[in-house]
Every structure is written in structure tokens, then in C-alpha cells.
Image: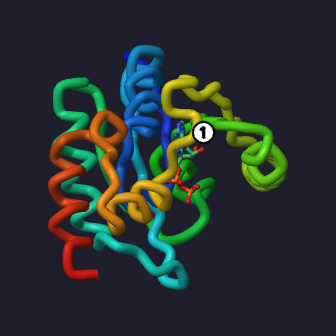
Amino acid sequence: MIVVRRVVCPGSFDPVTNGHLDIIGRASRLYDEVVVMVSINLAKKSLFTVEERLDLIREVTRDLGNVKVDSFRGLTVDYCKQHDIPVIVRGLRAVTDYDYELQIAQMNHRMSGVETLFMATNPLYAFLSSSLMKEVVQWGGDVTGLVPALVHDRLIERLKDA
Ligand code: ADP
């Protein structure tokens, strides 16, 4: 029997940044398959639609070869159960991420037994977040090298009239 070692990277990805990509790329070298799951949160205002976010992630992870994209509305652990995925990977940027991430990871484990593995962010991207990228681009700041070129173009296009 062939066992596929699969992991999920959940998040909003509004839009995907080089910080996300760094974590996804490193996870893709550790596992047979990485599922990047865009969580649908109707209460959260987003700049890009779920479909747009999925397309961007698909484009910028194509070369990795073992990355799939999907979206889901509900608990990440329910997605894991439905797709037989035992592990969630999350990036940890700084202590500010820690409290929240620990709480979610412990709750997820209690609910389902699904494990959360934390990957220390590449220090090059430790200050990066999707919201900061949006804020900077909106006011004409330069985020070259912090998001993939395709995402950069889409951000400028989307925010030029904002
Ligand atoms: P969420 O709304 O769930 O926090 P995000 O899209 O902001 O979704 O983040 C998804 C995942 O990517 C989380 O594990 C987050 O910690 C990680 N992440 C976000 N930004 C970075 C970054 N700059 N470097 C490494 N990991 C990051």
C-alpha cells in the first residue's frame, strides 16, 4: 500500500505573500503533498475573492509540483477529517503570533487529534503580512521582493482606484 503523506496549510491568503510561499515551499519538501486551503470567512472583508486567491496560489506554486489548492468554509479539522490529512502546518512570525496559534492548535488537537506543526518564519519575511502589503501598496509603497511579481501586479491593479 502506498501512503501519501499529506499536510494542509490553511489561511486567508488575501493575497499570498513570499512569507506564505516560503512556508509552503519548505512544507512541500517535507511532505508528498501540500494542500493550501483558503478558509472562507464571510465575516472578514477581503480584497480578492476566494477564486482569485486560489488562482494566484495555483500560479505561484505550480513549479513546486506537489501543491494543491482548495477552499473550505468551516473548521480546518473537519477539512482534515474529510481529506484524511493528519497535520496542519502554520508559520510563526513572532511572539505576537504565538498565543493565538497555541490556542487554536490545542483546540484543534482536542477536537480531532490533528497535529499542528509550527515552522519558524524565514527572518527575511518575518515582518510580512497580507494586510501590511495591501496598506503599503495602497499608498504607493514598494513591495517588490515581498510578494510574487504576479501578486504585485494584481495588488497595484486592484488598489489603484481604492
Ligand atoms: P490567517 O488569517 O489564518 O492568519 P494568513 O493568510 O494571514 O491567514 O496566514 C496563513 C498562514 O501563513 C499562517 O500560518 C501564518 O502564520 C502564515 N504566515 C503569514 N504570513 C507569514 C510570513 N510573513 N511568514 C511566514 N508565515 C506567514
Residue 87: give x, y in percent of width and height: 60, 35
The residue at which mark 1 appears reads as: 90
Kind of element beneath mark 1: strand
Amino acid type at circle 1 is: Arg
Residue sticking out furthest to the front: 140
> Which quadrant of the view contains residue 55?
bottom left
104 up-or-down from 18: above or below? below
Residue at 38%, 25% in the rendered image: 25
- Location of the C terminus by quadrant is bottom left
Ligand 1 closer than 8 Å to label 1 CB: yes
Left or right of 113, for residue 13: left
Left or right of 101, for residue 5: left
Residue 143: give x, y in percent of width and height: 33, 45
Q: Nearer the viewer, residue 3 or 28?
A: 28
Left or right of 81, for residue 35: left
> Which quadrant of the view contains residue 34?
top left
Residue 72: give x, y in percent of width and height: 43, 64
Q: Nearer the viewer, residue 149 or 138?
A: 138
